[in-house]
Amino acid sequence: MPEHQTPLIATIAAGLMLAFVLGLIAQRLRVQPLVGYLLAGVMVGPYTPGFTADPALATELAEIGVILLMFGVGLHFSLKDLLSVGRIAIPGAIGQIAVATLMGAGLSWALGWPPLAGFVFGLALSVASTVVLIRALQDRHILETHRGRIAVGWLVVEDLVMVLALVLLPALAVAVATEGKGIPSSQLLLSLLATLAKVSMFVAIMLIVGRRVIPWLMHYTAHTGSRELFRLAVYAVALGVAYGAHYFFDVSFALGAFFAGMVLGESDLSQRAAEEAIPLRDAFAVLFFVSVGMLLNPMVFVEAPLAVIATIAIIIVGKSAAAYLIVRAFGYNRSTAFTVSASLAQIGEFSFILIGIGIGLDMVPKESRDLVLAGAIVSIMVNPFVFTLLERLGADREVPPKYKPDAEPETDLTPTTLTGHDIVVGYGRVGSLVGAGLRQEGAKMVVVEASDAGVDRARSDGADVFTGNAAEPAIIAALNLAGARRLYVTIPEAFEAGQIVQQARAANPTLDILARAHSSATVEHLEKLGANLIVLGETEIAHRMLEHGRGDTRTAARSGLNDGLQDAPIAP
């Protein structure tokens, strides 16, 4: 069938295939796969020869990825978490937006643009990308830590500010264009109040009505026993609330999806909902990066190199430096300040929307779009390296505060002095069951966990705790694997588990390594890397059922976990 008759299929197929190939190459070169996704977008964009995908369709497909991503974030981000970081997130985000806007206005002045153009251009450089920030935090397993919540809360405040900006820009353009023609000066104030009223109404409806209706709907669907309907309900809630928020209240898709997830997160079905959203979320998140790459005109690097360099400097250096200083000024330590500043050292979807509206209203020159896109592409590519640099500097660690309740923890990677100890990687439902059994045996235990809740559980169980990703060499070195008795890898992520097993086997060839798996392929993968025992959920369930049918419960009794083991193999 001719290509022009199937633009949607062509865009998805070309985008995903090229993203896969270039992402795989990037991974082989030890570069973040998202660099490959961005280059895939450049290759199918209108400024390079060959096949050209539909930019409008790619942008809409990418928006679905943003919706599902923010919905997933909301599932793990309660209202209590949002309020707990408001003290730093609200003034911090507003202050950082103001500084970045001033820097952008300064660059526009140097380029000879009018003041209004400088304001819009600077505002476009001030807001970080939702997708990039969340992916960066997820990849490093710090999304659910306190500093991760600060970064997400900061992002939510930025989104709220941008919602106001999107409504006020048309009114501002009219006010400037009709200055001195008798147009009342109260127009901007009325627009601002109307926007605030709409946002407040949406938040109120979600917190009052949504907190009852959405969890009830999900529980009702779960009781039908149909996984297909439950998965459909997850997507319906995420996309439906996001679209409704945008259509009726002029709230961004991302913000609407975030509140939908946050409301559902109070239900005990939140973990299952998060699992169902992952497949589509990841696929459409890739299309987001492809769509960003499609918008870039590579000639801007040749035609305006100094302006591009200045724009990139504002995004990566100026904006992140402002965020770092603000966080430090509020009394947080370097770890938190570096995490927040690195998270925000890039721009994305809101920047494109703002600059597009500015061009449509003749508020900024058209060349501003190329500068914003070039800044976005480079900052997104560089962002993973910024995080890596901070990790190597030892600034990306977090342990619970020891003295003041509101103080951020200091860096602490002192190697454990234990020997003959058991190491548990991951302290969720599976890991905590393993920990409970080890505690009953009186074993010495070291736990590696990323979330605050898991860290608290492990400490209450008497374990030595390291916070972060166990696949990181610095944490591996601190666990004293050479002197350990046994390693339990309880996390469900196969690739990360494989990295941990491989490094542990290299550190201690005789170490007893036990891991969990969700498929036969994962079992084979972990066995090749050196695991002694891999527990496959379906296999263990079948064994337990057969044991019960035969009246043989000796295996479970010996484990000391007879009250909870039956759920362990399949618990996330």
Image: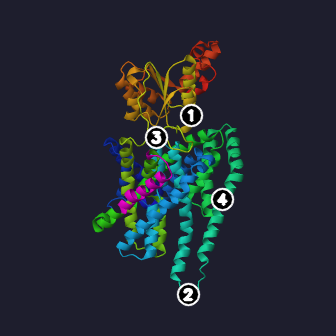
Counting residues from the start of the chain, the first of labels 1 and 4 encountered is: 4
Residue at x 48%, y 52% (from the top left corner) = 327
Q: Amino acid at mark 1?
A: Asp
Q: Amino acid at mark 2?
A: Lys
Q: Quadrant of the N terminus?
A: bottom left
The mark closer to the camera, 3 or 2, is 3
Across and down, in percent, residue 422 comes to 47, 22
Residue carrying label 1: 456
Residue carrying label 4: 202
Dot 3 alpha-carbon crowd within 10 angstroms: few under 14, some 14 to 19, many 20 or more: some
Q: Can you tell which mark lies on residue 410?
A: 3
Q: Quadrant of residue 411?
A: top left
**Residue 375 visible (yes or no):** yes
The alpha-carbon separation of the residues under discs 3 and 2 comes to 59 Å
The alpha-carbon separation of the residues under discs 3 and 4 comes to 39 Å
Counting residues from the start of the chain, the first of labels 2 and 1 encountered is: 2
Residue carrying label 2: 181
The alpha-carbon separation of the residues under discs 1 and 4 comes to 34 Å
Please say whether residue 356 is one of the residues in the magenta stretch: no
The alpha-carbon separation of the residues under discs 2 and 1 comes to 63 Å
Left or right: where 282 falls relative to 237: left
In the rendered structure, which segment of residues is drawn in magenta?
311-334
Q: Amino acid at mark 3?
A: Glu
The mark closer to the camera, 2 or 1, is 1
Please say whether residue 330 is one of the residues in the magenta stretch: yes
Question: In the structure shown, which secondary structural element does the residue marked by tag 2 occupy?
Answer: loop
